[in-house]
Image: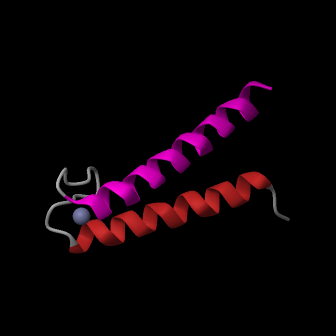
Amino acid sequence: MSSPTDDLYARYMAAYRAYTDHAETCTACTVQDPGTSCRGGLRLHESFARLQDAYNARLRKQGSS
Ligand SMILES: [Zn+2]
């Protein structure tokens, strides 16, 4: 069984993993926050944050309907 939500969740988790993998090896970034001087980390964190927002928004929508 698959749904758009599952796909969004999978992409959200993939983006989270991509960012945390980067943060573990990058001296400028932490798992919580990207380093302001690290463009790669900022980009990964931005796409992770965008997917997290979309995922949470969808959860809220489902909960209220
Ligand atoms: Zn970094």
**Residue 56 part of the magenta segment:** yes
From the viewer's side, name the closer residue of 42 and 54. Answer: 42
Above or below — where is 53 with respect to 22?
A: above
Give percent across and percent down for residue 39.
27, 59
Give percent across and percent down for residue 54.
60, 42
Query: In which image quadrant can residue 27 be found?
Result: bottom left
Give percent across and percent down for residue 33.
26, 50
From the viewer's side, name the closer residue of 14 and 60. Answer: 14
- Residue at the limit of the structure toward the right, as seen here: 1
Task: Indicate left or right for 7 with 56 as reference.
Answer: right
Give ligand 1's quarter of the image. Answer: bottom left
Give percent across and percent down for residue 50.
50, 46
Task: Indicate left or right for 6 with 25 as reference.
Answer: right
Task: Indicate left or right for 28 with 45 as reference.
Answer: left
Seen at 81% across and 56% down, the residue is: 3
Query: In the image, which residues are magenta?
Result: 38-65
**Visual colour scheme:** secondary structure
Task: Indicate left or right for 61 with 21 as reference.
Answer: right
From the viewer's side, name the closer residue of 52 and 39. Answer: 39
Taken as a whole, is the magenta stretch helix, strand or loop? helix
